[in-house]
Amino acid sequence: METTTVKMMTPASRAAALKREKAAAAKLARAAGKVAAAERRAADEAAWTQGMRKGREEIEKKIQALRKAMGVRKNEANTASICEMKERMEFEMLLALRKEILGE
């Protein structure tokens, strides 16, 4: 912190200069912290959207396999059991994704 090198400074002016330098360093540290936090949020958001996309694709594959196994045609609506299974799979996917990305 001792960057002020003027030898003929009074103690009061020296203290004021050090205080200014300390305040400037604190502002820079806060700005760097905000940038790092924004980068972390962007990385988390990208991982979340990618995880959601992959999870939904997997769920759709499972639902298609279930529909085929149950003999449900393409244009027919899902049965109540398939809808319930889909909701349960989405809920489990969200929990796993939250645990993986947010670490909770």
Image (tube, rainbow, N blue to C red):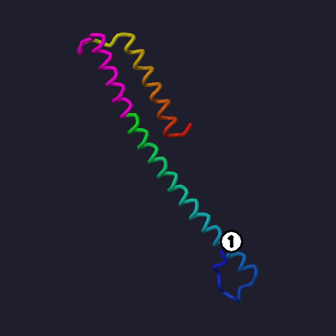
In front of the other: 35 or 83: 83
Q: Give the percent coordinates (x, y) of residue 102.
A: 52, 40
Q: Give the percent coordinates (x, y) of residue 41.
A: 48, 47
Q: Give the percent coordinates (x, y) of residue 51.
A: 40, 37
Instruction: Determine the secondary structure under disc 1.
Output: helix
- Residue identifier under label 1: 19
Q: Residue furthest right?
A: 11
In front of the other: 40 or 14: 40
Q: Is residue 73 magenta?
A: yes
Residue range highlighted in magenta:
53-75
In front of the other: 41 or 31: 41
Side of 18 where 28 appears, left or right: left
Relative to 82, residue 57 above or below: below
Q: Residue furthest bottom?
A: 8
Relative to 13, residue 95 above or below: above
* Image quadrant containing the N terminus: bottom right
Other-residue count near label 1 (Cα within 10 Å), few / some / many at <14 / 14–19 / ≥20: few
* Image quadrant containing the C terminus: top right
Q: Is residue 102 magenta?
A: no
Residue located at (71% from left, 85% from top): 9
**Majority secondary structure of the magenta segment?**
helix
Relative to 80, residue 92 above or below: below
Residue 78 placement: quadrant? top left
Give amino acid for label 1. Lys
Residue located at (38% from left, 39% from top): 50
Residue located at (38% from left, 10% from top): 80
Residue located at (44% from left, 42% from top): 45
Q: Give the percent coordinates (x, y) of residue 103.
A: 54, 39
In front of the other: 78 or 30: 78
